[in-house]
Image: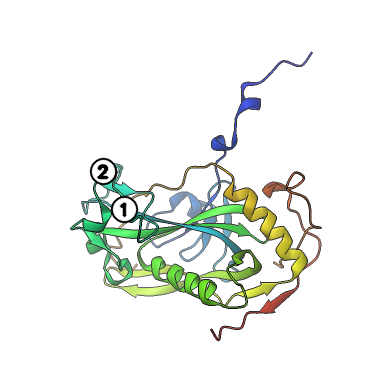
């Protein structure tokens, strides 16, 4: 007789999707003990360090636009004073945790990359939570783009949205993510950088479509903001599985055997 386990009845809401973090000069102590250096990426769930010079190939699944207002310059463990986890459209600009209308908020700033670290913490700024597929293993992850990494996300979205070849099928586009060193008023920092997208062949695109649909159907908590440490001083090949049905497929079993065909996307809109 097999005794039941409580966790057998857990649902998708109990899953923790990995978060990809961009390591800066300050903070990321655990990642640095595992060999990460500023500019590298770190996958929180698997403790995997992805070196900056290698980066990773990704397919974008979705972008969640959020707002965060810290309301202080001190570094502490307390949560932000106000936050909106749904600030995604002009028609629905979002409401803060206490019901404030983000559209009329006096602290609102839509250009965080133009502000230094201290100014960003005195404003309510846009962050982007990117839900992506890691093409190395087919697993999903979230990347929280804030500050100087916000503008590259807008540029990536523009490339994908306006390209006539894609026709809105973003699951067909692969882009390579690396980091780029920036000089800021607070010192040296790193921003994410996205390469010019390439277009997947039909068979590989079918797979990324199925994965995207499965991920979009999952329920999981998005990152809700964390302290941004002040910079006081300057301080493998993509492969593809055979196409499977939605019932057969899961993000964790997308082990791949052959490189997918890719075509460079025509960026002349």
Counting from the top left corner in percent of width and height, residue 87 is at: 36, 55
In which quadrant will I find the N terminus? top right
Closest to the observer, 194 or 52: 194
Residue 173 at x, y = what percent? 62, 70
Q: Which residue is mark 1?
A: 68
Q: Position of residue 94 (x, y in %)?
A: 33, 52
Picture disc at residue 99: 2
Give the label, 2 or 1, closer to the camera. Answer: 2
Q: Nearer the viewer, residue 48 or 2?
A: 2
Q: CA distance from mark 2 to mark 1?
A: 14 Å
Residue at figure coordinates x 21%, y 55% from the top left:
105
Query: How many C-alpha atoms fall within 10 Å of the one at disc 2: few (<14), some, or many (≥20)?
Result: few
Secondary structure found at label 1: strand
Label whose residue precedes the other's in the sequence (2 or 1):
1
- Left or right of 175? Residue 88 is left
Name the residue furthest left: 106
| Residue visible at 57% across and 39% down in the picture | 15
Q: Is residue 245 left or right of residue 126?
A: right
Relative to residue 189, is residue 124 drawn left or right?
A: left
């Amino acid at each position: 007789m097999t005794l039941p386990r409580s966790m057998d009845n857990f649902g998708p809401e109990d899953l923790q999707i990995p978060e990809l973090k961009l390591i800066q000069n300050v903070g990321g102590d655990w990642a640095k003990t595992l060999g990460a250096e500023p500019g590298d990426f770190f996958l929180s769930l698997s403790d995997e360090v992805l070196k900056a010079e290698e980066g990773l190939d990704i397919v974008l699944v979705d972008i969640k636009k959020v707002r965060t207002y810290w309301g202080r310059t001190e570094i502490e463990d307390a949560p932000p004073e106000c936050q909106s986890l749904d600030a995604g459209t002009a028609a629905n600009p979002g409401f803060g945790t206490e019901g404030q209308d983000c559209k009329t908020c006096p602290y609102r700033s839509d250009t965080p990359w133009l502000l230094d670290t201290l100014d960003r913490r005195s404003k309510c700024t846009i962050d982007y939570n990117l839900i992506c597929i890691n093409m190395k293993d087919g697993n999903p992850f979230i990347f929280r783009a804030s500050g100087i990494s916000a503008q590259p996300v807008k540029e990536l979205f523009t490339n994908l949205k306006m390209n006539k070849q894609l026709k809105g099928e973003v699951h067909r586009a692969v882009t390579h993510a690396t980091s780029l060193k920036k000089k800021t008023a607070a010192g040296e920092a790193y921003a994410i950088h996205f390469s010019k997208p390439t277009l997947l062949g039909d068979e590989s695109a079918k797979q990324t479509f199925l994965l995207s649909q499965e991920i979009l159907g999952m329920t999981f908590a998005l990152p809700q903001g964390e302290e941004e440490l002040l910079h006081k001083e300057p301080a493998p090949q993509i492969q593809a599985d055979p196409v499977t049905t939605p019932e057969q497929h899961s993000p964790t079993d997308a082990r791949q055997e052959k490189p997918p065909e890719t075509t460079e996307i025509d960026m002349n809109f």
